[in-house]
Image (tube, rainbow, N blue to C red):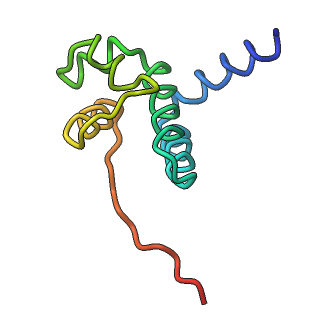
Amino acid sequence: MMATANYREGLMERLQNPEYATEYLNEALREGSQEVFMLALRDVAKAKGISYIANEANLNRETMYRMLSEKGNPNLSSLNKILGSLGLTLSIEAKESVA
């Protein structure tokens, strides 16, 4: 059980780094599952502090917890607020062509 706790603590520490958090979220998006992305976003928000993120995004803390829950489904404007409070932005890029 100790290894899991150490992994989790290490992950939370690494997610403090914006570049690491960005790649973590991008990898979750590449998985193609909303559930995986939401789990990753929840990890990044927890690393920064849910209360801090809620305050920065002008969202209620309880609303943040609901949006980031397993059944959460934030709308695009809420997602942009959360990402903005993390110093991140949503962007679109072309798929790599298969040749």
In the displayed structure, would residue 31 be above or below residue 98? Answer: above
Of the 4 image quadrants, the one containing the N terminus is: top right
Locate residue 93: give its quadrant.
bottom left
- Is 92 situated left or right of 26 in this image? left
Return the x and y of residue 94 as percentages of the image width and height. Answer: 41, 73
> Quadrant of residue 45 in the image?
top left
Q: Residue at x 57, y 52 (%)?
A: 31
Residue 19 screen position, x and y as percent: 51, 43
For residue 31, above or below residue 74: below
Q: Position of residue 56 (x, y in %)?
A: 24, 22
Identified at 41% across, 15% down, the residue is: 49
Please count the marks in the image. Answer: 0
Q: In the figure, 30 relative to 65: above or below?
A: below
- Decide: is 30 above or below 83: below
- Of 90 and 75, which appears nearest the observer? 75
User: Residue 15 versus residue 68: which sits nearer the camera?
Assistant: 68
Q: Quadrant of the C terminus?
A: bottom right
On screen, residue 65 versus residue 41, left or right, reads: left
Q: Residue at x 46, y 43 (%)?
A: 34
Which residue extends farthest front? 71
Rendered location of residue 82, percent (x, y): 30, 31
